[in-house]
Image (cartoon, rainbow, N blue to C red):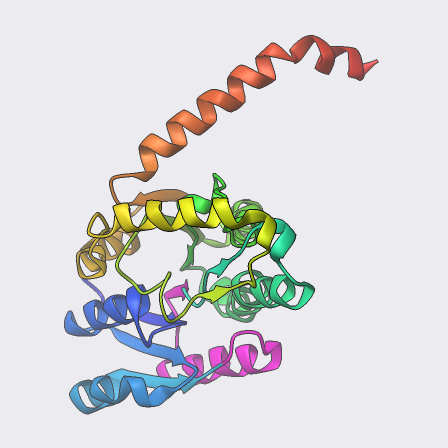
Amino acid sequence: MTEKVWFITGTSRGFGREWTAAALSRGDKVAATARDVRTLDDFVDTYGDQFLPIALDVTDRDADFAAVAQAYGQFGRIDVVVNNAGYGQFGLIEEITEQEARAQFETNVFGALWVTQAALPFLREQGSGHIIQVSSIGGISAFPNIGIYNASKWALEGFSQALAQEVEGFGVKVTLVEPGGFSTDWGGASAQVSEPLPAYEAFHEKAAEQRKSRVGNQGDPKASAAAILKIVDAAEPPLRVFFGTAPIGIAKADYARRIETWEKWNDVSIEAQG
């Protein structure tokens, strides 16, 4: 198998770190970004010129373009672009501040958009490439207390589905990876939490109990590495793929309810046509 060159954002922990390790260990080359590149020192020590650490805040559009260009200049091509950088914003919709909402979109949506735009000229020129967008089961469904996070992932899903159709003729593939719950610290140190409103005290207490009940029933990020390698090595990779056992059941139930509602109200839909 020909070695691949990866550009991966958000590699200091979680999926980004595990996928970086998996790519490097099989002989691929990786340009890996993190806000603090000191978290990547072990990769530098082990893999040398096979690995390129880049300090990057993905919300900085100019820096995104410079980072992708640096990776291309170092390795001469880019085969896989992984938009993994992101975080979860917790808070009910009424509790979310303007700053919190904008910050969530700056990272989860615009960060991925800028990196994607930066990579596309290189991928089109090559006539090949694979863009991996790390979404979530929360990108096709929605759950209380993470509504603004859901909104950011729905936006990512929307532009990525359109993108897949736009670049297919250039030999560029797009895949949305939609994980369920994984032990990635997504809900821990990397998360942001809004100031709770007293009116929702009972809801927050119930939500806290539910979170406790889910502890220990999460996927292993290390196991996901083998899965992502299968995706990037596939001749015909999927536009969407779930990671974990829970998402398929959530999706089936959610879409069944949507179809039932659309069909129930279809007479009104037809009336609206005029």
Residue toward you, 109 or 117: 109
| Span highlighted in magenta in the image | 57-83
Residue 77 belongs to magenta span: yes
Res. 234 visible in picture: no
Q: Nearer the viewer, residue 183 or 70?
A: 183
Give the image location of residue 7, x and y in percent. Answer: 38, 72
Q: In the image, what residue occupies the spot 22% across and 65% down?
A: 2
Image position of 61 (left or right of 168): right
The residue at the point 65 percent across, 12 percent down is: 266
x and y, in percent, of residue 122 in the image:
49, 70
Above or below residue 165? Residue 124 is below
Residue 231 on the magenta span: no
Vertical order, 41 against 7 (above or below) = below
**Residue 103 placement (x, y as % from top left):** 60, 68
Please indicate, yes or no, whether residue 256 appears anywhere in the rendered image.
yes
The image shows residue 132 at horizontal and vertical percentages of 40, 57
Comparing 235 with 33, the one in front is 33
The answer to whether residue 73 is above or below residue 133 is below
